[in-house]
Amino acid sequence: MNVEIAPVVERRLGALPASAEFLRRLDVAGIIDGLCPVREVAHLTHGQVIEVLVANRLSAPAPPVRIGDWAREWAVEEVFGIEADLLNDDRIGRALDAIAPELDRLVGTVGASAIAEFVVDVSRLHWDMTSISLHGAYERPEEGFPQVKFGHPKDRRADLKQIRAGIAISADGGIPVFHVPTTAEPARSPRSSGR
């Protein structure tokens, strides 16, 4: 009697099932697909690609060119139902390009979904400002991004340019709700202040 033994396939599981469950509860793919639809000929929606990319970031971060290799090593097909060969860097790039113009709406919608799904009390928020000191010239900052300037940083390095950022967290558990990058407060350059 010949018994044929099936080959054993081993894949890493890690936190993929937990990541997938949270992504589904928040309807991340549905939200993305609603704001960033794909053509009918696509094998994957942008939402499916981004969900896998989020799971990658949470388990074993890899550059876009290596996501397919990661998906072969991990149980991505079993958990997300997506073949590793479909996760090439071109497809990931197209998904990232598609969501870029909608980031504020995506973050807000997913955030609202998380607040509702996990019953986060946002009736009272705590606001915290911080400054991030930077090295370098930053002579021509791009429009639409925080402007790097001299200011009064918390680390007291007035000789360095900085940006400031604020984050609002819920009083209920300290959950980040939103953030705002801002410019540094006006201050004289150390060069002009006689230092």
Image: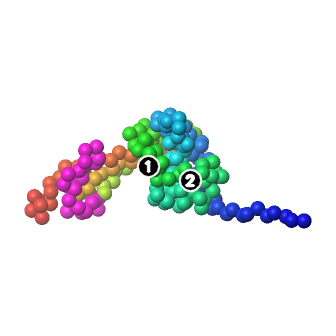
Q: Quadrant of the C terminus?
A: bottom left
Residue 178 point in image, percent of width and height: 42, 44
Left or right of 10 on screen, residue 151: left
**Which x, y percent locates residue 72?**
59, 59
Q: Residues within 10 Å of mark 2 (few under 14, many from 20)?
A: few
Q: Which residues are magenta?
A: 133-160
Q: Position of residue 142 (x, y in %)?
A: 25, 48
Residue indicated by mark 2: 85
Magenta part, dominant SS: loop
Question: Disc 2 and disc 1: Cα gap in Å?
Answer: 15 Å
Nearest the viewer among 157 and 84 is: 84
Instruction: Give the number of the mark in front: 2 or 1.
Output: 2
Please tell me whether residue 23 is drawn above or below residue 16 in the rendered image. above
Vertical arrangement, residue 163 with respect to residue 136, above or below: above
Task: Name the one closer to the observer, 169 or 6.
Answer: 6
Count residues near mark 1 (Cα–Cα under 10 Å), then give few for <14, some for 14-19, many for 20+.
some
Would residue 120 be visible to someone looking at this image? no
- Local SS, label 2: helix
For the residue pair 67 and 12, the one nearer the viewer reads as 67
Q: Amino acid at mark 2?
A: Asp
Q: Which mark is residue 93?
A: 1
| x 25%, y 62%: residue | 135
Q: Reading the chain from its start, which is encountered first: label 2 or label 1?
A: 2
Q: Position of residue 139 (x, y in %)?
A: 18, 54
Q: Give the residue at x 20% y 51%.
A: 140
Instruction: Give the image's coloring scheme.
Output: rainbow
- The amino acid marked with disc number 1 is Gly
